[in-house]
Image: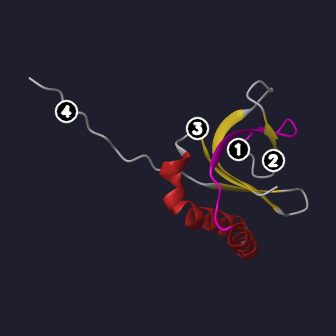
């Protein structure tokens, strides 16, 4: 007898972040994932995430990615800058280290 394992594709939701001044800051998916598995579709997903945030951001991010030669996907940590919840749409974030309070792991691209 053998056990069959059903694998469901994991749907990752890209989120876009801007600075307090409205500049693109980062785009990410929650959790640490293999950056190589995200790299193929990442640029389109990143641009879409910024478009969904505000359409004018998509053009800015497309230009940034073109100048950089593409998105560099890596694992990093983020944390909210104030006492807002991480899922609050008005929350601002900073790059963090794993040991900082309220830090959470992400995989994505940083623009600043």
- Residue denoted by label 3: 32
Image quarter where the C terminus lies is bottom right
Q: Are marks 1 and 4 in contact (CB under 8 Å)?
A: no
How far is the residue under mark 1 from the one under mark 3? 18 Å
Q: Which mark is residue 87?
A: 1
Q: Nearer the viewer, residue 72 or 50?
A: 72
- Residue denoted by label 2: 91
First in residue order: circle 1 vs circle 4 = 4
Query: In the rendered view, would you say 35 is above or below 67?
Result: above
x and y percentages locating residue 101 in the rendered image: 80, 26
Q: Is residue 14 magenta?
A: no
Query: In the rendered view, would you say 18 is above or below 92?
Result: below
The 10 Å Cα crowd at callout 1, few under 14, some 14 to 19, many 20 or more, is few
Q: Residue at x 62, y 62 (%)?
A: 46
Q: Are marks 1 and 2 in contact (CB under 8 Å)?
A: yes
Range drawn in magenta: 69-87
Q: Nearer the viewer, mark 1 or mark 4?
A: 4
Q: Say what secondary structure mark 2 lies in.
A: loop
| For residue 9, side relative to residue 88 (left or right) | left
First in residue order: circle 1 vs circle 3 = 3
First in residue order: circle 2 vs circle 4 = 4
How far is the residue under mark 4 from the one under mark 3? 27 Å
x and y percentages locating residue 60 in the rendered image: 76, 73
First in residue order: circle 4 vs circle 3 = 4
x and y percentages locating residue 25 in the rendered image: 79, 56
Q: Residue at x 77, y 24 (%)?
A: 99
- Residue denoted by label 4: 4
x and y percentages locating residue 66 in the rendered image: 68, 73
Q: Nearer the viewer, mark 1 or mark 3?
A: 3
């Amino acid at each position: 007898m053998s056990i069959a394992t059903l694998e469901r594709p994991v749907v990752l939701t890209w989120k876009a972040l801007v600075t307090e001044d409205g500049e693109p800051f980062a785009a990410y998916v929650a959790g640490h994932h293999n950056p190589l598995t995200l790299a193929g579709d990442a640029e389109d997903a990143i641009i879409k995430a910024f478009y969904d945030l505000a359409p004018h951001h998509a053009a800015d991010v497309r230009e940034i990615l073109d100048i950089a030669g593409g998105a560099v996907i890596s694992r990093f940590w983020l944390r909210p800058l104030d006492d807002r919840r991480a899922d609050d749409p008005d929350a601002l974030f900073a790059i963090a280290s794993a040991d900082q309070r309220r830090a959470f792991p992400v995989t994505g691209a940083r623009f600043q």
